[in-house]
């Protein structure tokens, strides 16, 4: 699904890949804590993840299998 740059749904930004299959986020964190960083990124990416999952079930399967690898 193509989404124009800088689109938002219900006030939440929808992100597109920067290069290939990557999305870069800038987060302001109170401390350098992996758990806080991952939770903040997930919160910021929720709408984008919802659109991906709704439109592409293979992406959801990949995300489910790769998330433990990425987190480790």
Image (tube, grey):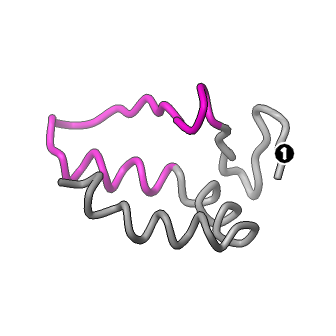
Range drawn in magenta: 17-44
Give how far across and how far down residue 58 sits, in percent. Answer: 62, 69
Figure check: 1 above or below 32: below
Give how far across and how far down residue 49 sits, in percent. Answer: 59, 60
**Residue drawn at (43%, 56%), measured in percent from left and top?**
42
In the visual, does 68 lie left or right of 51? left
Disc 1 crowd rating (10 Å Cα; few below 14, some 14-19, many 20+) is few
The reply to whether the magenta stretch includes residue 31 is yes
Give how far across and how far down residue 12 sits, in percent. Answer: 66, 51
Q: Main secondary structure of the magenta part?
A: loop
Label 1 sits on residue = 2
Question: Can you tell which quarter of the image residue 29 is in?
Answer: top left
Figure check: 2 above or below 56: above
**Residue drawn at (65%, 73%), measured in percent from left and top?**
57
**Residue drawn at (46%, 56%), measured in percent from left and top?**
43
The reply to whether the magenta stretch includes residue 58 is no
Give how far across and how far down residue 15 sits, in percent. Answer: 65, 41
Question: Can you tell which quarter of the image residue 64 is in?
Answer: bottom left
Nearest to the observer: residue 11 or residue 25: 25
């Amino acid at each position: 699904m193509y989404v124009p740059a800088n689109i938002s749904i219900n006030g939440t930004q929808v992100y597109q890949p920067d290069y290939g299959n990557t999305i870069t986020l800038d987060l302001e964190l109170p401390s350098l804590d992996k758990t806080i960083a991952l939770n903040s990124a997930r919160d910021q990416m929720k709408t984008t993840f919802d659109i991906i999952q709704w439109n592409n079930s293979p992406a959801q399967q990949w995300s489910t299998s790769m998330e433990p690898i990425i987190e480790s």
